[in-house]
Amino acid sequence: MEIYRTHKCDELRTEHIEKKVTLAGWIHNRRDHGGVLFLDLRDHYGITQIVVYEDSGFQELAAHLRKETVVQFKGHVQARESENINTNLPTGQIELKAESFQVLGHCGDLPFSVFPEEQAPESVRLKYRYLDLRRSKLHENILLRSRVIASLRRRMGEHGFNELQTPILTASSPEGARDYLVPSRLHPGKFYALPQAPQQYKQLYMMAGFDRYFQIAPCFRDEDARANRSPGEFYQLDIEMSFATQDEIFKILEDVLYGVFTEFTDWKITDTPFPRIPYRESMLKYGTDKPDLRIPLEIVDVTDIFRNSGFNAFKRVIEKGGIVRAINVPQIAGQPRSFFDRMLEFAQSIGSQGLAYLVWNEDEVKGPIAKVISKDDLEALAKAGGVKTGDVMFFVCNKEKEAVQIAGEIRARLGEELNLIEENVYRFCWIVDYPMYEYDPEQKQIIFSHNPFSMPQGGMEALEDKDPLDILAYQYDIVCNGAELSSGAIRNHQPEVMYKAFDIAGYKPEEVDAQFGALINAFKLGAPPHGGIAPGVDRMIMLIANEPNIREVIAFPMNQSAQDLMMDAPRDVTKKQLKELHLKLNLPIGTDSENKTDQPR
């Protein structure tokens, strides 16, 4: 049987000198040094230098091979000349003196260079993703992904969790994002859905008595792409525990996350237990429930100070129910006017009418609104924000929802503009005590705020006696460096409590039975208290790899329009396929897809 290689391209060392070996891989680089040809041969594992002398009989032939051609070389290992030793390579002290070679795979014109790694349009990179994956950084990211997932599996096993699978073809859910629907051939007019998450199935595992479940679960949501969210599909570390409290879930996940991040990075990591920040506190201090704790700035509410101030522009907004939020930034009074102009332009771009500010100088307070703020109010503002000489306080005034969002985004932009973001660190925190409900002004009714399956704090008593907007849920998010890794909750496992919780949100019992029949029926047949969480694997690896875009840690991602350019998906199907599924297309005007359905695939 032919042996393609006796060694991999990272294996040969000085102890192999004079040994006859066979290597195979891609031509990574080529250098012609006047009668001596040097080729770098690359495989999955590393690089070995091949030297081809004039007397080999094939030097000219080898010299004309294109980069990325797949070649096999046979020869003897020899020591490199001292001036040619490469201390950056594990194989840098040896080279292979080529005595024969064979082309295993010819390479045509490359759409972009693998080495050196030139910039290429994303559309070209995704169309030729298999070529893109040969490049060192992306190749390492995918290997990192494999190692991280293996580590997650090992750590979950050490905590007594069993890896169990859930169906891919399931029922459509009325909650959450848009489903990907799959038409049924055997049941005309009916559809499966790809799971947005294995939520109900993992809870049903608890009903079945499996106690501790986990899965590296594929999930499918028809959502738009973002830098930290891939359209179409993603993976999560899906976890569920029976007889578990919120504290127990936190302890296990903290151990897993701290261990994984410690294993794969040398950055500083938040010590366990991670800080816990109530939702309302997070929205006040950071303007978001995904706070980036690397930014040493906090937002304060100063509505009462401006309520009776001489600044009428703010007073009028407050009288209509608006609020004022302030951000104090230490020791930036010396910033040029262009900085304040950029911040104003940014604030207006995200929906603010303006961006007022005050500058505390040594002798006086200056700024666009300084003349209309009384001395007492200036002192109150300084006290509220912990202001010192040299500080600048920015103000946002708007309706509450808008003011919270704008202040949060301005805090983040200040961190970027002023280089305040702490480097080489992972700042984790839990966001806890989410409100169970919120008021929807469009529907003019109470709706679920987040996860409708969460257990309300206080149980049935809270649902019956409290204002719904004051009820908190046993729901929590895990956040790292401003990125939400996951939401989780202690589940509402008591049928009567679930019916009541849904009733407050406008669902009748028969609607609950129709939409969540499997789950509610299981609860009626002996349900243990249980809870879980599902951190995003892709986002986790994105953070560890320090990549700004999630597509850099996914082997075959879609583009921002949810297209696989390499496989040409989604694509048209034949009329025969549509007929088998009992489907007819009702396409938007101007599309030509219907004319393409006859094409063979």
Image: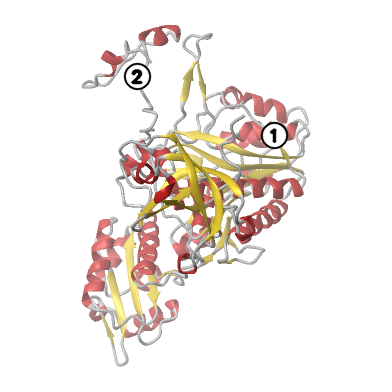
Which numbered disc covers residue 367? none
For badge 1, the amino acid type reads: Leu
Query: Circle 2 — which element?
Result: loop
Q: Which residue is mark 1?
A: 164
Quarter of the picture containing the N terminus is: top right
Q: Nearer the viewer, mark 1 or mark 2?
A: 2
Query: Circle 1 — which element?
Result: loop
Quarter holding residue 461: top right
Q: Nearer the viewer, residue 288 or 443?
A: 288
| Identity of the residue drawn at 42% across and 49% down | 55
Q: Is residue 454 visible?
A: yes
| Identity of the residue drawn at 61% across and 46% down | 149
Badges 1 and 2: C-beta atoms under 8 Å apart?
Answer: no
Q: Disc 1 or 2, which lies upstream in sequence?
A: 1
Q: Position of residue 592 (x, y in %)?
A: 24, 19
Crowd around label 1: few <14 · some 14–19 · many ≥20 (10 Å): some
Crowd around label 2: few <14 · some 14–19 · many ≥20 (10 Å): some
**Rendering colour mode:** secondary structure
Could you tell me how far apart the alpha carbons at marks 1 and 2 are, in whole angstroms? 35 Å
Total numbered circles = 2
Q: Which residue is mark 2?
A: 572
